[in-house]
Image (tube, helix red, strand yellow):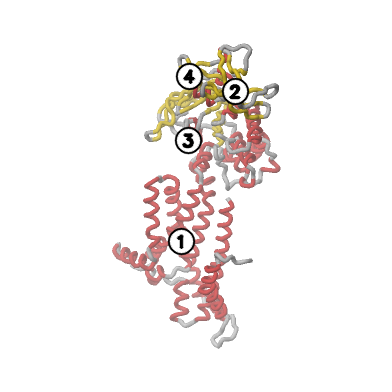
Amino acid sequence: MKGVEVYVEGITKKYGSTTALDGVTLRIPPSEITTLLGPSGCGKTTLLKIIAGLEPPTKGRVYFDGRDVTNLAPEKRNIGFVFQDLALFPHLNVFENVAFGLRVRRVPEAEVKKRVYWALDLVGLDPSEFARRRIHELSGGQQQRVAIARALVIEPAVLLLDEPFAHLDYKIKQRLLLQLKRIQRETGATVVYVTHDQNEAMAVSHKIAVMNNGKILQVGSPEEVYEKPNSSFVASFFGEANVLPGEGGFIVIRPERVLINPDRADTVYDAYIEDVVFQGPLLHIEARVNGKIIKIIKPRNGMVVKPGDKVRIGWLQKDVRVVPE
Amino acid sequence: MKISTIILPLVIFLALFFYAPFIILGYQSFQGLGGEFTLDNYLALVRDPTYLHVILYSIVIAVETTVITLLLAYPASYYVARIASGQEKIILLALLLTPFWIDVLLRSIAIKTIIYTIGLREGYTAMMIGMVYEYLPIMFLPIYASMSRISRSAIDAARVFGANTWDLIRRVIVPMTLPGIVAGSLLVLLMSMTEFVIPSLLGGTQGFTIGSLIYYLFLSGGLWGVGAALTMIVTVMLMVFAFIIAKRTGDITAW
């Protein structure tokens, strides 16, 4: 399957007097995973629903491979959607849930069976064991996989996922994220992934669009956005960051770039260690400088600081990022 | 089975005013005129085709009431549960349910006046208008409840995966509201089968149903034994259905 390129142009969505999306333009490349990352209420789910056709935009256009689909009904867009609450059909078993999109496309029975088994295999559910199960007999992670299989079985032009793993345990979530990446590689689908969780976004994305207040603030690869945030909001929302007032706006310094008792640094302050939190291989350290807390992250080996220690902290100019706001 | 103390008052009440009389009635249905054991009362019901005719006629009325109320209540419940919002929903619900709170006898008399005003007289049509009026809310409420439980995203999902309106109704909305359809239909079917007030007041010569027959056997005909036998048959039939409903209700909560 070959994914389509999705292009949304100048999308504005208003509900009465509230503006959910404010002139959003975004190019979503084919056959990649693009994440819409932002806090709740930033408009990311609304944008996903507009791409799916479940909500009409107040203004703006949606294109699939250059074709204007703004007024196309959702059932004609060939979309796979994994809903936040999964929205599996409780009256159908696993097989019929996955088969739904094929049934309404009047696909012949033999083909339905083949495709449903393919999709169940793809998400790691053994068809012979799970096909006849009822939805309420499955665990949360298994239901999640059924929802993904149901979205993939129609070989969608675009696969849209709305916080699909939000309610799952950390380990199951990690496993499903890896599985999602593998499925995307194997199928070549265009995937749009919505989340408020920066770790999920880092783990899964080729490209991240950071959103806030109905606007896209920055688009780029996870590394680009992490290394070169264009605003203090992006810096603190995507990864940990120290944001300090500085020349021409704010300066951003990542906690792992802060040096303790450095031999050589461009900027140095005297500091007190306020707190040290053990985080497995890493230590999360809080140092107080002139009444302000600086977050520091260091590997645990060889690092001996404890609360109350008086230290010098500093950083190199090349690790500092200046943002206007 | 242990009866919990919190349900005990209700059990005692029903035992005293329903189940005890029911057992006495069962006993009487096997008694002849001289007090001896007999099956004659039941055999009389089978031998005289008039009884069977009245039972079948009541079933026809009940089925017809069920079908008409279902056809009226289903789209209405869809609209109120899924399309109407805020104030419109509250107003519609209040309007639909208001007649429900008024006593059936008062309503029937009111309908009689209306029917006379539009030039109809007592008869089958008048009776059916009364029946539909009476049972519409009973059909509406369980369907409305199951309609409200369908999540917005289940409908969105059906749409996104390619369902047109017909697929959506056939494959998602109807199956997901099936518990409500079954509950509403059984309730209306069973309650309307033994309806007495409306057929008597509005049915005219067409209003002789099971209810009228039992009334006649006990109070006018003096045939207590046959009346008891007929009551037994109808009540046992209703009990069987009651168990089906209870089972279905259990299934619904299992979702």
Where does residue A288 sit, x and y in percent of width and height?
A: 55, 24
Secondary element at image label 4: strand
Q: Which residue is mark 4?
A: A245
Residue depicted at 50% across the width and 16% down the height: A322
Residue type, mark 2 in image: Ile
Residue type, mark 4 in image: Pro
Q: Which residue is mark 2?
A: A296
Q: Which residue is mark 1?
A: B64
Where does residue A301 sit, x and y in percent of width and height?
A: 70, 23
Which chain does the numbered disc 4 sit on? A
Indicate which label's residue lies in the foreground, 2 or 3: 2
Q: Is mark 1 in CB contact (under 8 Å) with mark 2?
A: no
**In the displayed image of the protein, which residue is found farthest to the bottom?**
B34
Residue depicted at 48% across the width and 35% down the height: A54
Residue type, mark 1 in image: Glu
Q: Which residue is mark 3?
A: A54
- Estimate the spatial distance between the alpha carbons at disc 1 and disc 3, rounded to whole Å: 40 Å
**Side of A176 relative to A16 (left or right):** right
